[in-house]
């Protein structure tokens, strides 16, 4: 009977440390001391540990394929990101496998494992929600990987990341609205993108605090579990807009452009003029935002460059080169959905209802 391969858990048990500490030591992470790294690496050699037996046996062999995980193929944000990844991959002679996570970390991990079984040469996962334990598993595969705009808050020192600066983008959006004279500004956020939502919300709050404005009840609206039956971000944004208007806001900063489109639809259903009576600003810079009426002011993410940079980083990792995390800056695109604030905000009664007037699913 063949002897069971030594695992990271075995080394952790022998050394009396955590699974994460062993994984970091084996990857030469700077987060633990050199003494601990040396001790664990020596122990691993003595125990006969082989890093990822499958990956080790395949060392030197290449499939010329890359795995890319996105949250949804229906989200227009990812079209440009995928294009950026694809452009760089094609120039390098690599083919692309595409998988969908549907904002579910378990499904995301299933896709990652599937890519690993296909022996891809590298993995990019966009808006990743993998936990610490799942990230450690991905790192153990010994397959180069890059996280793009990851949404979980766990440790990722074993993997490289590329981000857009969500905080800077939120401050840009708020500075624009404050310069237009708005003082009652709402925020329509998303619960399914926890990290970026938290950072954008903090930028919103800090901007108000810096202007000496106290946040009133109802200004901050987050699409929570009870909004998950909506078909998409458009519907959620519309319902959140209604709640913010009930709180007397004159402008709303939306988590993304799809929320902003929904907010615009809600205003149209309520007979409100945008930007004459209320201003709306989005985030992302998707193409749809410039084609609605009025075109939506937005914080533009360099989505094509994000995809290109993630793939360039992955190529460097595949060549064994050192790679640092990268942060890209967004920019403000002023269009026609924002204008100077009204002296008196629009009042929406508590009985106003948009049920049946914005898209949502049934329980089928």
Image (cartoon, rainbow, N blue to C red):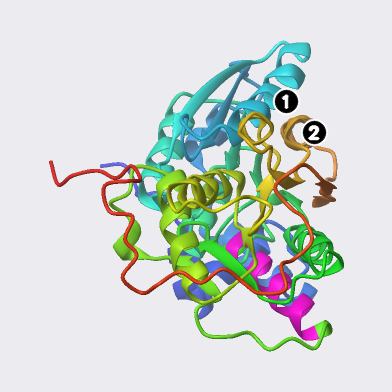
Q: Is residue 271 above or below residue 79?
A: below
Estimate the x, y position of residue 310 in percent, counting from the top left: 73, 37
Q: Nearer the viewer, residue 213 or 115?
A: 213
Estimate the x, y position of residue 206 in percent, counting from the top left: 76, 79
Q: Is residue 22 visible?
A: no
Q: Secondary structure at mark 2?
A: helix
In the displayed image of the protein, which residue is found farthest to the left?
A: 364
Asked if the residues shown at circle 1 and circle 2 are in contact, with their CB atoms under 8 angstroms apart, the answer is yes
Q: Nearer the viewer, residue 63 or 42?
A: 63
Residue 43 occupies quadrant: bottom right
Estimate the x, y position of residue 80 in percent, counting from the top left: 67, 27
Residue located at (66% from left, 74% from top)? 344
Q: Which residue is mark 1?
A: 84
Q: Secondary structure at mark 1?
A: helix
Question: Is residue 247 in the magenta section?
Answer: no
Query: Along the polypeptide, which appears first: circle 1 or circle 2?
Result: 1
Drawn side of residue 171 relative to residue 104, left or right? right
Task: Write down the region rendered in magenta.
Answer: 196-209
Residue located at (32% from left, 49% from top)? 230
Q: Which residue is mark 2?
A: 305
Q: Is residue 186 visible?
A: yes
Dominant secondary structure, magenta: helix
Residue 187 occupies quadrant: bottom right
Other-residue count near label 2 (Cα within 10 Å), few / some / many at <14 / 14–19 / ≥20: some
Residue located at (61% from left, 33% from top)? 292
Q: Nearer the viewer, residue 359 or 53?
A: 359
Mark drawn on residue 245: none
Q: Nearer the viewer, residue 274 or 114?
A: 274
* The C terminus sits in image quarter: top left
């Amino acid at each position: 009977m063949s002897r069971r391969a030594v695992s990271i858990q075995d080394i952790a048990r022998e050394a009396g440390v955590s699974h994460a500490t062993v994984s970091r030591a084996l990857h030469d992470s700077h987060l633990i001391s050199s003494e601990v790294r040396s001790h664990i690496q020596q122990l691993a050699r003595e125990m006969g540990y082989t890093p990822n037996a499958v990956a080790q046996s395949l060392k030197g062999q290449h499939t010329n394929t890359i795995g890319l995980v996105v949250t949804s193929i229906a989200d227009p944000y990812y079209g440009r990101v995928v294009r950026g990844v694809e452009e760089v991959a094609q120039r390098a002679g690599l083919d692309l496998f595409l998988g969908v996570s549907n904002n579910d970390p378990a499904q995301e991990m299933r896709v990652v494992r599937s890519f690993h079984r296909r022996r891809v040469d590298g993995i990019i996962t966009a808006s990743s929600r993998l936990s610490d334990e799942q990230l450690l598993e991905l790192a153990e595969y010994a397959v180069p990987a890059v996280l793009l705009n990851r949404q979980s808050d766990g440790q990722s020192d074993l993997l490289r990341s590329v981000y857009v600066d969500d905080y800077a983008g939120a401050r840009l959006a708020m500075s624009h609205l404050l310069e237009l004279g708005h003082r009652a500004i709402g925020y329509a956020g998303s619960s399914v993108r926890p990290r970026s939502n938290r950072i954008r919300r903090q930028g919103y709050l800090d901007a108000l605090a810096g202007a000496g404005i106290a946040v009133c009840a109802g200004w901050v609206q987050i699409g929570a579990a009870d909004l998950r039956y909506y078909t998409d971000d458009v519907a959620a944004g519309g319902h959140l807009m209604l709640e913010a208007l009930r709180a007397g806001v004159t402008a709303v900063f939306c988590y993304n452009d799809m929320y902003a489109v929904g907010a615009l639809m809600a205003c149209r259903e309520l007979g409100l003029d945008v930007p004459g009576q209320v201003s709306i600003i989005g985030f992302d810079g998707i193409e749809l935002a410039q084609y609605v009426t009025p075109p939506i002011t937005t914080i533009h993410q360099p989505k094509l460059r994000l995809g290109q940079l993630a793939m360039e980083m992955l190529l460097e990792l595949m060549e064994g080169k050192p790679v640092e995390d990268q942060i890209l800056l967004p920019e403000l695109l002023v269009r026609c959905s924002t204008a100077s604030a009204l002296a008196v905000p629009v009042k929406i009664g508590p009985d106003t209802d948009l049920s049946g007037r914005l898209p949502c699913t049934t329980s089928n």
